[in-house]
Amino acid sequence: MPPRDHAVLSASGSKRWMTCPGSVRLENFFEDEGSAYAEEGTKAHGVAEARLRAALGLQSPEGATAEQPTEASVGEEMWTFAGQYVQYCTEILETMQLNGHTVRAYIEQRVCFDRWVPEGFGTVDFCAVGGNDLHIVDFKYGKGVPVSATDNSQMRAYALGFLQEMECIYDNLQTVTTHIVQPRINNISSETMKVADLLDWAKKELKPKADKAYSQTREYAPGAACKFCKAKAVCKARAEGLLGSIGKILQGGEKRGKRDGKR
């Protein structure tokens, strides 16, 4: 069977399904319609990948036939921001080399983390391994919502995927640093964890919540994660939560009105 294009429990959606496991069942009824923002992000990732491969002297994947991007073909803005991401990645490599490590880099590395998430897989924008350290970098081209690497389940899942895929090669890794590079809003953040702590989090937090979400449970927990849920417009739990909030606001207004009338 050919691999899926999208995981049922995607790393990028992990914050949502870990918080609201029932959203997975509801989203099955909706197609991914895409958007202009998603298309722009895909294009920017392609530019960033090509420029990073060129900077590191790495060949494009076998079968890739796309023309090399230029500033004229993609525009000054995208070219500049992709370049900032490339610079960040190369600086990680240079720092690791200055620390005396032999470093290996991976670009657009597909990883599988199904040891903790059923059918879980994804693609890591950039990985660097040297000594006992692993670095994972994710390029975010969006400019609407700042994304932090701290407590970021997507980035941790990617790190777990690399550990699972490469454990027979890199069995001495002790620390993992995940990085978010979001240059359009000048947002760069990172989180460093011991591998032992990451594995402990995966066992106690990620796996139990992934198993529940994959089971097609009807357990819902509407909240901030609803923003990116495809089923939010038809979610009964979300609607009831909103009505409850509105009722509390109206009730509070009535109480204040009565108090004011007694004065």
Image (cartoon, helix red, strand yellow):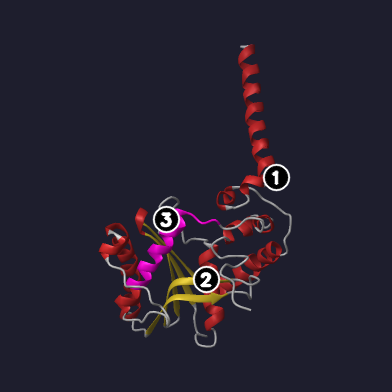
Residue 142 percent coordinates (x, y): 42, 55
Badge nearest the viewer, 2 or 3: 3
- Residue 236, numbered circle: 1
Which residue was labeled with disc 2? 158
Badge 2 density bin: few <14, some 14–19, many ≥20, Cα 10 Å: many
* Span highlighted in magenta in the image: 33-51
Number of numbered markers: 3
Distance (Cα) linking label 1 and label 2:
32 Å
- Residue 211, numbered circle: none
Q: Amino acid at mark 2?
A: Tyr
Relative to 139, is 199 on the left or the right? right
Which residue was labeled with disc 3? 142
Q: Is label 1 in a helix, a strand or a loop?
A: helix
Residue 61 percent coordinates (x, y): 42, 80
What is the quadrant of the N terminus in the image?
A: bottom right
Q: Amino acid at mark 3?
A: Gly
Determine which quarter of the picture holds residue 37.
bottom left
Determine which quarter of the picture holds residue 242.
top right
